[in-house]
Amino acid sequence: MLIKKISSKKVKIGKKDYTESVAVSSEGYIFSWSAKKDRLTKKELKPFLERGPEVIIVTKTSNLSKIDQNLQELLKEKGVLLLFDELNEAINSFNLMVKKKKKAILFLDLK
């Protein structure tokens, strides 16, 4: 399922537009999600890690500006590639992973 950016606060996933923050898997699952603070933590990602992703992509925004060090270390230990990019780059990276048939999860912070 490819993603298309419509604006900085809106994306199209499949045939539906989203303006709320969501997590999207390369397998086509869409989950309601939002960062609780200015940094992403291990606790927030734990349910998603159980899906066994090869790549996790997170959008860097004014609301979400850091990835917790403990989370970075955990992902490294599990062999999960972490990408932390601006919206356009994050979407491009996710779409590339989908085309390469990689197991990826994209966390879109659209607030």
Image (cartoon, rainbow, N blue to C red):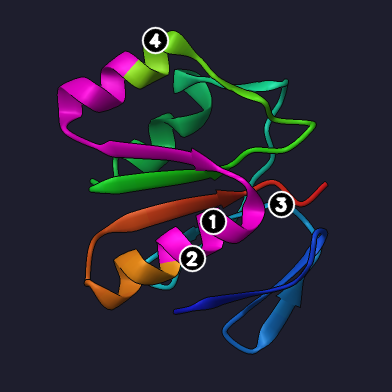
> Which class describes the residues within 10 Å of circle 3: few (<14), some (14-19), or many (20+)?
some
Three-letter residue code for mark 4:
Asn
Instruction: Determine whether 82 is above or below 5 in the image.
Output: above
Determine which of the numbered discs, if any, sits on residue 89 in the image. 1
Task: Give the x, y percent position of residue 74.
Answer: 28, 19
- Of callouts 1 and 3, which one flags the residue occurring earlier in the amino acid sequence? 3
State the SS at label 2. Answer: helix
Three-letter residue code for mark 1:
Glu
Between label 1 and label 4, give the one nearer the viewer: 1
Residue under label 2, please give it: 92
Residue 13 occupies quadrant: bottom right
- Of callouts 3 and 2, which one flags the residue occurring earlier in the amino acid sequence? 3
Q: State if disc 3 and disc 4 touch (CB < 8 Å).
A: no
- Of callouts 2 and 4, which one flags the residue occurring earlier in the amino acid sequence? 4
Residue 46 occupies quadrant: top left
State the SS at label 4. Answer: helix
> Which class describes the residues within 10 Å of circle 4: few (<14), some (14-19), or many (20+)?
few
Q: Which residues are magenta?
A: 73-94
Q: State if disc 4 and disc 2 touch (CB < 8 Å).
A: no
Task: Give the x, y percent position of residue 5.
Answer: 68, 71
Q: Is residue 95 left or right of residue 103?
A: right
Give me the residue at 48% from left, 65% from top: 92
Task: Give the x, y percent position of residue 64.
Answer: 69, 30
- Marks 2 and 4, Cα distance to the nearest angstrom? 26 Å
- Of callouts 1 and 4, which one flags the residue occurring earlier in the amino acid sequence? 4
Main secondary-structure element of the magenta-colored stretch: helix
Most foreground residue, 49 or 56: 56
- Marks 2 and 1, Cα distance to the nearest angstrom? 5 Å
Instruction: Determine whether 80 is above or below 55 in the image.
Output: above
Residue under label 4, please give it: 70
> Which class describes the residues within 10 Å of circle 1: few (<14), some (14-19), or many (20+)?
some
Residue 22 occupies quadrant: bottom right
